[in-house]
Image (spheres, rainbow, N blue to C red):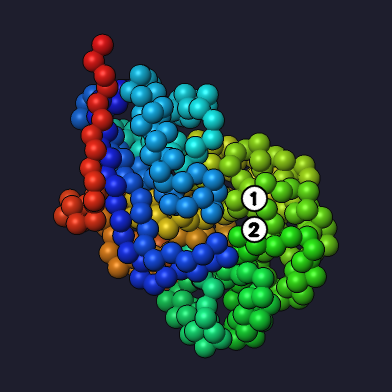
Amino acid sequence: MKIVKIKQFQMKLPLVSAFKTSYGERTEKLFDLFLLEDEKGYQGVGELVSFEQADYIEETLRMSRQILIDELIPCLFRMEFSHPQEIWQAFQPIQGNFMAKSALETAVWDLYARREKISLQNLFSATKESVSVGVSMGIQPDATSLLQTAQSYVDQGYERIKLKIAPGNDLGPLRELRAHFPDLQLMADANSAYTLADWQVFKEMDQLKLSMIEQPFHPRDYVDHGELQKRLKTPICLDENIRSLEDVKTAHALKSCQAINLKIPRVGGITEARRIMDFCQQNQLLVWLGGMFESGVGRALNLHLASQSLFTFPGDLSAYDRYFYDDVVDPKAVLENGKLKVPKKHYGIGVTLEEEKIKKYCYKELIYKPKEK
C-alpha cells in the first residue's frame, strides 16, 4: 500500500455555547481534516485536533501543521506498508507531536479498513452496536445555570457528567450537583489547576461519592498525584500526563492514579492507544475514552475504539449537537437512550464527508503529492 495524494482541509466550526475551563474559554473549534488516497484510489480521513493555544498540552495547531508539512507527510509518502501499525513505527524517530502523528495514522487505519471493505470495528474485535456516553460540562456562572444545564443533560440521557473545576469554583458546584442528583455518575476535572497544597479541598470532595477526580496537578507530575491518591478513597484519573505507554507505566509504578483518560490524538493514534489499553487491562487500571471537541470524523473513530468490551465507563463522546450547530459527516452522531451508535453506514470509520459542509466550513485547502524522483 502506498499513499499517492493527501488533501488537507483547514476547518472552523462554531460552538453552540462558550466552553469554560481552568485554561480559559473557547467559542469555536479550529481543526484540520486529512484525506489520504492510495495507489488504488481508496481514501481514508483523519482529524487534527490540536488547540490554537498551548494550554492543554504544548502542541498547538500551528506546530502540528508545520511538523506535518516538514516531516510526517514526507515520511508517509516514502513508505510502502501492509498494515497501519507500520505507520506508528515509522513515526517513532520524530519526537513528540502526537496529535500531528495521530491525524495521519488514524487516516491510514480508516483507509485500510475501507480497502479491506470492512468496518474499522472489525479490526478491534469489537462487538458493541452502541456506546454509553457521558458529557463534559464547563464552569458555570451561577448555581441556577449549573443545575439547569446538568438537568438538560440528564434529560437527554447522558449517563455521566464531568464538571470542570478551578480553585474557588469547585466544592460548591459539586455539592450542588450531588445534592440534586444523588445517584448520578459524577466526576470532577481540574485540568492541572491545583497543587498538593490544596489537598484538603480534594479531601472534602472525597465525601461526595465522585466516580473520579481528573488531573488535579501539573501535566508532568507523577509524585504528587501519587501522594494525593494515597490520601483519598476517590480514584485519581490522569489525562494530560498520558502521552505514551511509558507514561502509563510510570503512573502505575508510582501509584499516581487508578484510572486513565485515554485520548487517541494525545497518544499519537490508534496503535499506541491499543498498547495502553492492553497494559491497563493487564494491570487493573480503569481506562476510558475521552474527547477533544472532535468533528464527526474524530467522533466516529472514538466510537469504533470505544465499542470494545474493555471500555465500561461512559466516555466523553457526546452527540455532535452537544458542542456544534452542524457537522461535516454523514451520518451525524445522535444520542439515543444515553448511547451513541457505532456508525456503520460506510466501511472504515462508518461516515463520509459531506462535500457541501466541507465547502461551507473549510477556509483553506491544500494538496500534497510525493516529490518526483
Residue at the extreme left: 356
Q: Which residue is at 46% across, 46% downward?
A: 60
Q: What element carries label 2?
A: loop
Q: Where is residue 323? Give x, y as percent.
A: 38, 66
Q: Residues within 10 Å of mark 1 (few under 14, many from 20)?
A: some
Position of residue 55 in the picture relative to residue 72 (left or right): right
Q: Which residue is at 46% across, 76% downward?
A: 153
Q: Which residue is at 58% across, 42% downward?
A: 243
34 vs 307, nearest the viewer: 34
The reply to whether residue 56 is visible in this rendering is yes
Position of residue 368 in the picture relative to residue 156 (left or right): left
Placement of 89 over or under 211, stated as above or below: above
Disc 1 marks which residue? 219
Q: Is mark 1 on a helix, strand or loop?
A: loop
Placement of 110 over or under 183, stated as above or below: above
Question: In which quarter of the view is residue 319 placed?
Answer: bottom left
Placement of 340 over or under 267, stated as above or below: below
Number of disc labels: 2
Residue at the extreme top: 373
Q: Where is residue 211? Give x, y as percent.
A: 66, 67
Q: What's the residue type where badge 1 is placed?
A: Pro
The reply to whether residue 76 is visible in this rendering is no
274 vs 106, nearest the viewer: 106
Disc 2 marks which residue? 192
State if disc 2 and disc 1 touch (CB < 8 Å): yes
Placement of 189 over or under 112, stated as above or below: below
Q: Where is residue 276? Give x, y as percent.
A: 60, 41
Return the disc, 1 or 2, that comes first in the chain's sequence. Answer: 2
